[in-house]
Image: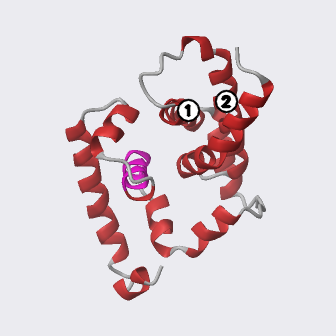
Amino acid sequence: MLTNEEMHDLMDTYSPYLLQVSFMYVKDWVAAEDIVQESFIQYFKSYASFEGRASIKTYLTKITIHKCTDYLRSWASRKRTLGKLFGQKQSHSYEFETQLEHSELMKHVLQLPLKYRESIVLFYYEDMTTIEMAGLLSISENTVKTRLRRAREMLKVRVETLGWEELLNE
C-alpha cells in the first residue's frame, strides 16, 4: 500500500507530463485535469497489480491515453464540442496552453486526426522511439511508422501556406 507521501510524490512528478499528454488528446484543460485525476485514482486502486514490466511513467501514460480515448467517445466530449460551436468560451491561464496558442506549428498538429496527432506528439515532443510508441499504444511498430509518415504528409500540406522561416523561429 502506498503512503500519502508516496502518492503526493508520484502526482507531483508525473502530473505536468500527464496533463500535457491528456490535453493533446482532448484539447480541453478542464477535461484534461479530470482525466489525469482519474488516471491517478485508477493507478492507486490497482497499485498492487502493477508488475513493473514498464516504468511508472509509461504505465500512467497508458492509463491516461485510455481515459482520453474513453472521454473522446463519451457524451461529455460531444457536448463540449457542441458548446464550442455555439460560442461558449472557456478561459484558463496555463503557461502550456499559452505556448500552444502561440505556436503555429502546434496549431496545425492539434488539427490532425487523433491517431496522427498522438504519433507526432509522442515522437517529436516526447522524444519516444517508434518501438516505445508501439508498446504504449498497443500497435505494431510498422503501424506507428505509417502513422508518422501520414501525419508528416498532412502537416506538410497544412504548413505550406506558412513560410518555413516562421516555423524555424519557434
Residue at 68 percent across and 47 percent down: it is 80
Residue placed under numbered mark 2 in the picture: 40
Give yes or no for contact between labels 2 and 1 (Cβ–Cβ under 8 Å): yes
Magenta residues, start to end = 113-123
Q: Amino acid at mark 2?
A: Phe
Membership of 115 in magenta stretch? yes
Q: Position of residue 158 (x, y in %)?
A: 36, 71
Residue placed under numbered mark 1 in the picture: 60
Label 1 sits on a secondary structure element that is helix
Magenta stretch prevailing secondary structure: helix
Residue at 25 percent across and 33 percent down: it is 140
Q: Nearer the viewer, residue 48 or 106?
A: 48
Label 2 sits on a secondary structure element that is helix
Q: Amino acid at mark 1?
A: Leu
Q: Position of residue 49 (x, y in %)?
A: 55, 11
Residue at 22 percent across and 47 percent down: it is 146
